[in-house]
Image (cartoon, helix red, strand yellow):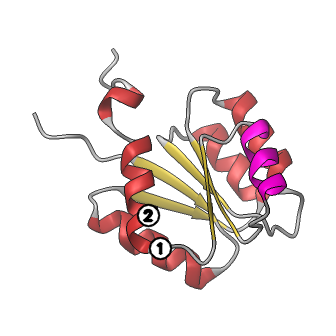
Amino acid sequence: MLPRERRILCAEPHEDTCSLISTLLVRQGHQVVSAKTIGECLALAGRELFDLYILDDDYIDGTSLELCKQLRRLTPETPILFFSSHAFQRDRDCGLEAGASAYLTKPGDIFEIVQTINAILRPSALGPAPNEAE
């Protein structure tokens, strides 16, 4: 059985970064939906199922830590990856404490980004797709 396509919500306000991430993930066989604001991200997460959230740290309508906490309450089992320009250890610690599954810093190594996402999305790590569980 072939692995199913994973749905990923990329909450990234910078179009160039979002485009790069989307291109990488589509080439890996995933479907990517993008949001530029926290409001857009929460609206999408409230009405659609995703296998992974990718969060930035620079939103005009709130903080990434609060977004992470809200997503964790909304969908506790969905992994969250921070892809952040905040590279201090305390930033990483705060992201992980807020509920992130992994924390990568910008600029990121493309291989590391893909490798981390693939590790998070391993079938054994996620279980069946929402429509496969029925």
Q: Do the residues labelled 2 and 1 touch (CB within 8 Å)?
A: yes
- Amino acid type at image mark 2: Glu
**Quadrant where the image shows the C terminus:** top left
Picture coordinates of residue 82, whole percent (x, y): 65, 55
For residue 52, above or below residue 89: above
Secondary structure beneath label 1 = loop
Picture coordinates of residue 86, whole percent (x, y): 77, 67
Picture coordinates of residue 127, whole percent (x, y): 36, 24
Circle 2 packing at 10 Å, graded few (<14), some (14-19), many (20+), is few
Nearest the camera: 95 or 31? 95
Most distant residue in the front direction = 89
For the image, the number of numbered tags is 2
For residue 116, above or below residue 50: below
Nearest the camera: 12 or 118? 118
CA–CA distance between discs 2 and 1?
A: 5 Å
In the displayed structure image, the side of residue 65 where residue 29 appears, left or right = left
Label ID, residue 42: none
**Residue bounds of the magenta highlight:** 89-98
Secondary structure beneath label 2 = helix
Most distant residue in the left direction = 1
Q: Main secondary structure of the magenta part?
A: helix
Q: Quadrant of residue 31?
A: bottom left
Nearest the camera: 121 or 73? 121
x 57%, y 85%: residue: 16
Residue 70 seen: no
x 70%, y 48%: residue: 43
Q: Mark 1 points at which residue?
A: 109
Q: Mark 2 points at which residue?
A: 112
Q: Is residue 96 magenta?
A: yes
x 42%, y 73%: residue: 110
